[in-house]
Amino acid sequence: MARAQKKLLICIDNEGYEVSLERRKIYVALPDTTASKRGHVRVVDESGEDYLYPKTMFIPVELPLATRKAVLADA
């Protein structure tokens, strides 16, 4: 059930976060209502930890179920 709440996002801008984020890469976003209200998203970045980033750096992506499961299995 926890995985169903995770969203997949594509990074479209990594300016200022070049070490932590790769452009055009899919990232897992964790639910964080407070961050969302403040214009941020909680993302598991290249360090393997979750951090807050501006929402404008990402766009949501919808994947076929099998692909989504494969991506989240490695997350």
Image: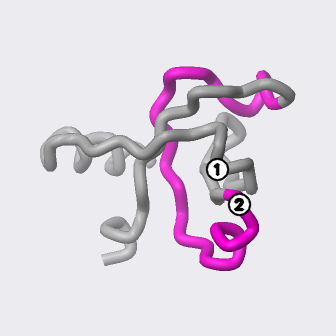
**What residue is drawn where x is 56% and y is 32%?**
11
Left or right: residue 74 compared with residue 56: left
Type of amino acid under label 2 = Gly
Q: Position of residue 60 (x, y in %)?
A: 42, 45
Left or right: residue 66 compared with residue 14: left
Question: Could you say which quadrant of the image residue 6 lies in?
Answer: bottom left
Type of amino acid under label 1 = Lys
**What residue is drawn where x is 38% and y is 74%?**
2
Left or right: residue 42 compared with residue 67: right
Contact (Cβ within 8 Å) of mark 1 with mark 2: yes
Q: Position of residue 41 (x, y in %)?
A: 64, 57
Q: Secondary structure at mark 1?
A: helix
Q: Position of residue 23 (x, y in %)?
A: 59, 21
Q: Secondary structure at mark 2?
A: loop
Q: Which residue in the structure is indicated by mark 2?
A: 39
**What residue is drawn where x is 23% and y is 49%?**
69
Q: Which residue in the structure is indicated by mark 1?
A: 55
Q: Using the image, determine if residue 60 lies above or below residue 42.
A: above
**What residue is drawn where x is 57% and y is 40%?**
58
Q: Which residues are magenta?
A: 17-40
Q: Using the image, determine if residue 33 lies above or below residue 57.
A: below
